[in-house]
Image (spheres, rainbow, N blue to C red):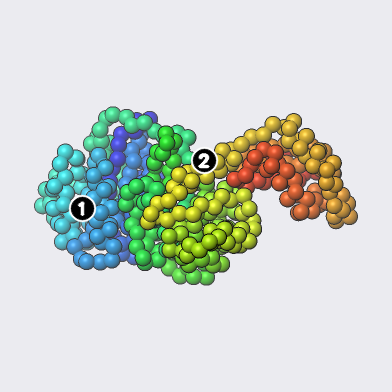
Amino acid sequence: MKVLGKVAIVGAPSTGKSTLFNRFIKQRKSIVSEEHGITRDRLYSTCEWLDKQFVLIDTGGIEVADVPFQKEIQIQVDLAIDEADVILFLVDGKAGLTNDDQYIAKQLYRVKDKPIIMAVNKIDNVDMKDNAYDFYSLGFGEPYLVSGVHGIGIGDLLDAICSALPSKEEEQEEGQIRFALIGRPNVGKSSLTNAILGEKRVIVSSIAGTTRDSIDTPLKRNGKSYVIIDTAGLKRKGKIYESIDKYAALRAMDAVSRCDIVLLVIDAEMGLIDQDRHVVQLATENNKPVIIVVNKWDLHTHAQDDQKKFTEMLRSYFVFLEYAPIIYSSALYKPNLDQIFDAIDNCYRDFNVRVQTSILNEIILEAQVRNEAPSFNGGRVKINYASQVATCPPTFVLFCNNPSYMHFSYKRYLENCIRTTFKLNSTPIKIICRKKGSGIDKII
């Protein structure tokens, strides 16, 4: 399939850019709401049309009025226009020609050597065709009449976009390591994302909840390919009042489910709160490796043994994450970024490891001889055979006389034996007990 380039959708707020973005990519990735000005950062996704493929960029709405984040949104739109091969200028057929449209048009007049396609959105029926005439005055030729909600005119618009894109193919990256940054609001996830990328990729503000979408950005470091996903700050369920917060939480959940590694960002200045434990449940429920990144360490006191004490506090607070590496950093001064990537690489290797069955069985047999299982539920578990049935995370099935005899402490003991032998220090491990002769169930 030909990969042609990048297309940026620009326009005023509430013209339906995100609705059209979702229509093009055939999934609900960009947040859509009746609330004004929801999209703030650049959102990327791949759009396929017939035998062609291109990268689609959704941007925030540009307007004349001085509203919150408008300067930051303008920067994001300028960056999107700069990297795009084709600009799709979207206007609102119901609202008609506005001052915002004219303001954006003046900006686009300065764009040189890039095709600009105008589309009039929200033309939901034939009777509304006349609404497009006012937009001819903007000077971008005949506009395409579409309805992002109903799918009217989408095929013709995609044909025009593919025709305007450069014909050369771009290489598609394979084997990328995807890692997502999660945390409660305002712990510095977006600042850390920008520090890792070395550019102002996402909007940073002292206002909690600035990031609302999950934002994927590919990058290369030391010859390796990664995708970094910045997510919205996660509030406690009882604190989610707005529909936008619900969508943001859903985006964060989706980001965790499709990433390989999760970076749990902790605010060193504010310390640990119960919400940190609730946030990381997203990762543990999805059996993802976790790296704990203590951000804003520059704002913490630096007395002797402070880092050691903070680490001990983390380990006692997250007793279920004893395998998780801990990195101390600062988005402002950027220390230990190499350590973060070393930890990501180690987690990815452990997450995908596959062990030899014969050695696994030797380890399980030796573990039982060295430490006999305790009596539990009226019997003592005896493991006859072990097999690894999946990776991501490494998943092991233990065939035994009776799974109900397995005490959780002995299961933990066996897990530690496996970790130590195969040096699986940075990933969760899944152990499933099956009654002997029941067969190996498919593990998903």
Residue 8 horizontal/vertical position (percent)? 27, 46
Residue 256 horizontal/vertical position (percent)? 51, 51
Residue at 27 percent across and 57 percent down: it is: 73
Badge 2: how crowded within 10 Å, few (<14), some, or many (20+)?
Answer: some
Question: What amino acid is found at the position of numbered circle 2 in the picture?
Answer: Asp
In the displayed structure image, the side of residue 287 where residue 70 appears, left or right: left
- Badge nearest the viewer, 1 or 2: 2
- Residue extending furthest toward the front: 304
User: Any mark on residue 345, and which?
Assistant: 2
In the displayed structure image, the side of residue 233 where residue 325 appears, left or right: right
In the displayed structure image, the side of residue 211 where residue 10 appears, left or right: left
Instruction: Give the alpha-carbon distance from disc 1 to disc 2, as whole Å.
Output: 55 Å
Q: Quadrant of residue 82?
A: top left
Residue 49 horizontal/vertical position (percent)? 35, 37
Q: Which sits in the foreground, 117 or 7? A: 7
In the displayed structure image, the side of residue 350 where residue 294 appears, left or right: left
Q: Quadrant of residue 320?
A: bottom right
Residue at 56 percent across and 38 percent down: it is: 349
Figure quadrant of the C terminus: top right
Residue 149 horizontal/vertical position (percent)? 34, 53
Q: Which residue is denoted by mark 1 in the rendering?
A: 129
Question: What amino acid is found at the position of numbered circle 1 in the picture?
Answer: Lys
- Vertical side of 307 occupied by 169: above or below: above
User: Any mark on residue 170, and which?
Assistant: none
Figure label count: 2
Q: Which sits in the foreground, 322 or 251? A: 322
